[in-house]
Image: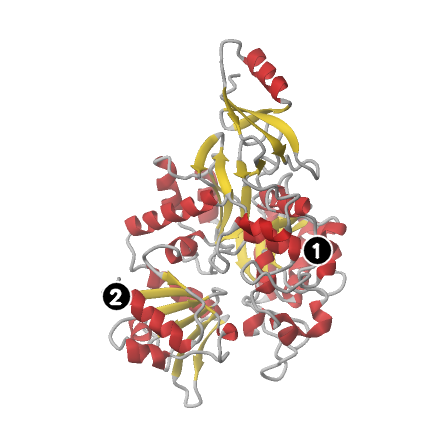
Amino acid sequence: MRIDRILCSKRVFTGLTDSAEELAIAVSGDKIAFVGAKEDALAFAHEADGSAEPEVVDYGDAFIAPGFHDSHVHFFHSAVYSSPLATNFLGDNEADCVERMKRFAQGRPEGWLLAQGWREYRWDPPVLPSKHSLDEAFPNRPVALYSGDAHTLWLNSCALAELGINRDSVPPAGGSYDRDADGDLTGIVREAAAMELMPRIMNAFSDDEIADAYRGFLRTLAQNGITSVCDMSLMANPGLDFIRDDVHARLLDSDELTCRVNLFPTLLEDMDRFEAMSARYTGPVLRCAGFKQFFDGVSSQHTAWVTEPYSNARCEDDCGRPTIEPDKMRALVMQAAEKGYPVRIHTIGDAAIHEALNIFEDARAQFGPLPEGRHNCLEHLENFLPGDVERLAELDVIAAVQPPHMTLDPGGPERDLGDERVKLMWPFRTMLDEGETLAFGTDSPVVDVNSMGVLYSAATRRDPQTRAPEGGWRPEQLISRAEAIRAYTAGSDAAAQRNGEAGVLAAGKLADMAVLDTDLLTCADDEILDAHVTATWMGGRCVFEA
């Protein structure tokens, strides 16, 4: 064995304890060979290869942690909407969004105009937009604005015509085309209908343009100390889920993939694509790890599937609905379980969570636990029925959650679900106390990739932008800094089905590390947001240095 380099600091958080220690990390190839005192690491290097003089990188009192892992990213959309191909904004209201699109159009004089990020419930006034404002500004050019929660499209008439959507069009199951009192299309397209249209819109870009967008997003990940992501399917239709393994493979071949990518394509009856990708991508950087499916929508639009009607119900029995029928979801999960394949299911409402757990429980009873190192996961999990938090740990189901989601809509949970159900929303403290594994992420582009924002939200239950509310939202569910970092490293590694390959700093693990200028365990709360990643190491290679 040859020790290539030794990284050392007075503040190394291995993830195996709750504190940071003065340690040295000896790296051989892409793995950690030794962790201990600096003099012991040097002795270990000499014993391993007496003729070698490893590079010593002394980070002084910088904070070294395992590389962060975003357990839920939509890579394609994150890359495109953070690139010059599109724009991203919340907007103050409908008119403000249209003006922003006009400014963006000045730099893109031809083709589709794309944006992402609007949330009408955060506007003044909080009302849905329509095609008419876009038609006035862009009468002859297709415009598509994807909502911040990635579940709704706002289109102009030119875009509707380009996509072949008219007054007589019938939306796919699980989706809808909004209409006004006269039955005319408003330009708002929801859930499965929006997801079905997105691939056709995105076909406007070439593979080279997409690859450039991926390169830009990879730089953002490295700047945030993120060394691994789960690239999650964004829709249910075969071949249209935006898992662009071809782009990832192209960047891997050119040694430009500076982050481990774990692919989760759509769970379908036909598993040929998944099995082919699983056989093709088996290396430490790119692999196909499991399946993803959708069971419901989002609470803010009343499309999350809940047991009791929304507190501010818009119609009788306003409980949302499953995006695919429970019997079909059951059949799909059973098919995967029979082959030992892990499944990750989008479940936001308490009814979706409860039924998904029932399905996982029945699959476990019929086929036994998944093979070692594999785990089923539920994604988002915003509100629970009593008793279902405990079932997560009992069934070995990982909770892949996004801490910044808690404060995306101030007052929204109370408005939509009421005070009693709010008590069971994002219950991180209870989950950990019950022995549950948390896996942190962002759901990018729903929330921008910002590793410090994830940790700040988890440790304070406050919004990274406004730093509100004072004391944190539902502060009884606060968790410690060490627990938050573990959820963002080892927990996400488990959700990625990597069987403990990374997530902690120990001998035999992948040499993935984030170096920061601030001790995340001891600094003041607001100093988390001011912390900077100064270096990122992936597989023993420095992929970012400030």
Q: Which residue sits furthest bottom? A: 182
Which residue is more in the foreground, 401 or 236? Answer: 401
> For residue 61, what is the image quadrant?
top right
- Residue that mark 1 sits on: 478
Describe the element under mark 2 as helix, strand or loop: loop
Amino acid on which the number 2 mark rests in the picture: Gln
Q: Residues within 10 Å of mark 1 (few under 14, many from 20)?
A: some
Q: Is residue 455 left or right of residue 120?
A: right
Label 2 – label 1 distance at C-alpha? 46 Å
Which residue is more in the foreground, 370 or 97? Answer: 97
Residue 452: image tag = none
Q: Is residue 43 above or below residue 453?
A: above
Give the percent coordinates (x, y) of residue 348.
61, 64
Q: Is residue 261 above or below residue 537?
A: below
Give the percent coordinates (x, y) of residue 201.
34, 64
- Residue that mark 2 sits on: 106
> For residue 22, what is the image quadrant?
top right
Amino acid on which the number 1 mark rests in the picture: Leu
Q: Residues within 10 Å of mark 2 (few under 14, many from 20)?
A: few
Give the percent coordinates (x, y) of residue 289.
52, 44
